[in-house]
Amino acid sequence: MRASNYLFKTEFESYDDFILNYFLHYDDNFNFATDVVDSYARNEPDRLALVYCDEEGDGNINFSFSDISDLSQQTAAYLKSLGIMKGDRVMLILKRRWEYWIIAVALHRIGAILIPASYQLTAKDIVYRVNASGAKLLIAADDDYVISQVEIAKKDCGELKDIALIRKRRDGWIDFSRGARNTKERFVADDSIRFDDHFIIYFTSGTNGPPKMATHAYTYPLGHIVTARYWQCVKDGGLHYTGSDSGWAKFGWGSFYGQWLSGSAILGFDAANRFDAKIQLEVLRNYMPTTVCVPGTIYRILMHEGLKKEDFASVKHCCTAGEPLSPSIVKDFKELTGLTIHEGYGQTESSVLIANFPWFESRPGSMGKPSPLYNIVLEDPMGHICPPGTEGEIVVRSLQYGLPEGLIQGYFHEGSVRKAYGDDFKYHTGDIAYRDDDGFFWFVGRNDDIIKCSGYRIGPFEIESVLITHPAVRECAVTGAPDPIRGQVVQATIVLNSEYQETAALTKDIQDYVQKQTAPYKYPRIIKYAESLPKTNSGKIIRKAIRAEYETVSGS
């Protein structure tokens, strides 16, 4: 069942028409598994849902919606046999294996809560996430690194009942692929599921503390109709590609919900652990997606690797999100391919909030204009709306009238969900922007110090919590430093213990230490040493002062 079945109006003459007349209609028991996947399977069983390919080229499979429906019903029955019930939390570390889509839809049928996790997590990361969420089952990909980290973590994961592995047999693990394949029963759905039940939990990057658990309702997929149909402009019967690991919210934005609701198939390229621009270009040439959404860094790298117009010959629309994109990149890409990169903005906690929609010409460097789902304003510290040209925090207002589809219910903590807004019924993004006289929003920076490196969102706290355990480190602060390729890289400013001295060997040792203790992309590529760190009177490190010092030195 396509997006049009959930809208009173689907075609709009202008952005104003879109803002005024976009409206979603759905039943109280809306369930993505039955109302979308199974509806396609009944009405258009042969409609293409997923084109799966891997880097080796030996695992290429096309899945129709009939395939997805049947396999997910079979998998749901197997999950039920393992004791998974409505409300249970299940963590998936599956990279971009085709099994992710099947298992996710199966969990949606049951009413179990899906927790995606990145394959780059270390054992320490996994322990925290499993224990904080109370996950009952963890299902992992057939990847040596993932397997090793899960096995190290398991002994410290108190509530975790089982670990399961796809495509491999291993002592101490449930053989998930074999078990699902041999299951004869089918489970369609738990008919007690409501639209406001918990659907998915994404771990945020963490800023001033550990990663938070952003919890979304069963209406979350509906929020991504705007993301997919009206920003990414996916085509009914087309093929959409978004480059993202399944452990990130970006995957939900671009490789699943809104695309299927809008009638587009998904290109699921299961890349190896390292990004390879040449292989990425080969995939685009061979599989010919109609729409593409990747981080700005990827566009930069592809052009650096010799991108040609014919590489994007099939592509009708390009998008990017996750990091600010230099206007020069937009200009160079358009000159090369004839395509405009349309920027969008949102968070793990939302669907697309602000975007360059098709009713107006994109302005390079601008996030665009607000989605009709959200009442978005820029506020000063006193809560007043900022006039054009004045910087303010991006805030979603009017939540007393109900949560927009796509916005989080709240943050899961100790078995319950805490609201993400206060008595003022506002959701504060923590991001700073300004609005020009024509209503375009322009990103200025993060208020919460998150670093955006090659499309990844990196919270300083997670890295600092590892750094501080190194014997040489007395104090540390992690910030982002500008980088022409990655947008930003991680910089660590360190105060050493008295018995250590700054050396190149020590710097490398600290970098290696972080790479072993947390996901590899988080390690500090720049390390600076200082006598002390700037702090507030209460002892809180002022990262803004560190960044300002770096920018002053870089610009001198």
Image: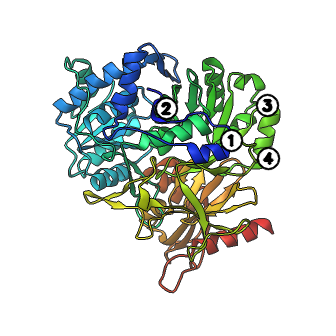
Quadrant of res 204? bottom left
Q: Residues within 10 Å of mark 2 (few under 14, many from 20)?
A: many
Quadrant of the rendering where the C terminus is positioned: bottom right
Report the mark closest to the observer, 4 or 1: 1
Give the residue number, with chain letter if any, for mark 3.
Answer: 338
SS class of the residue under badge 4? helix
Q: Nearer the viewer, mark 3 or mark 2?
A: 2
Give the mark toward the camera: 2 or 4: 2
Question: Toward the viewer: 19 or 225?
Answer: 19
Q: For the residues labelled 1 and 3, say whether their Cβ atoms are less than 8 Å apart.
A: no
Q: Residue at x 37, y 29 (%)?
A: 35
Q: Nearer the viewer, mark 1 or mark 3?
A: 1
Dot 3 or dot 2: first in sequence order is 2
Residue identifier under label 1: 14
In this picture, residue 509 sits left or right of residue 305: left
The secondary element bearing badge 1 is classed as loop
- Tell me the CA gap for discs 1 and 3: 24 Å
* Residue identified by numbered label 4: 328
Q: Which kind of residue does numbered mark 2 sit on?
A: Ala
User: Which residue is at 46% across, 30% downward?
Assistant: 5
SS at circle 3 = loop
Report which residue position mark 2 lands on: 3
Marks 1 and 3, the one that precedes in the sequence: 1
The amino acid beneath tag 1 is: Ser
Residue type marked 3:
Gly
Q: Are marks 3 and 2 in contact (CB under 8 Å)?
A: no
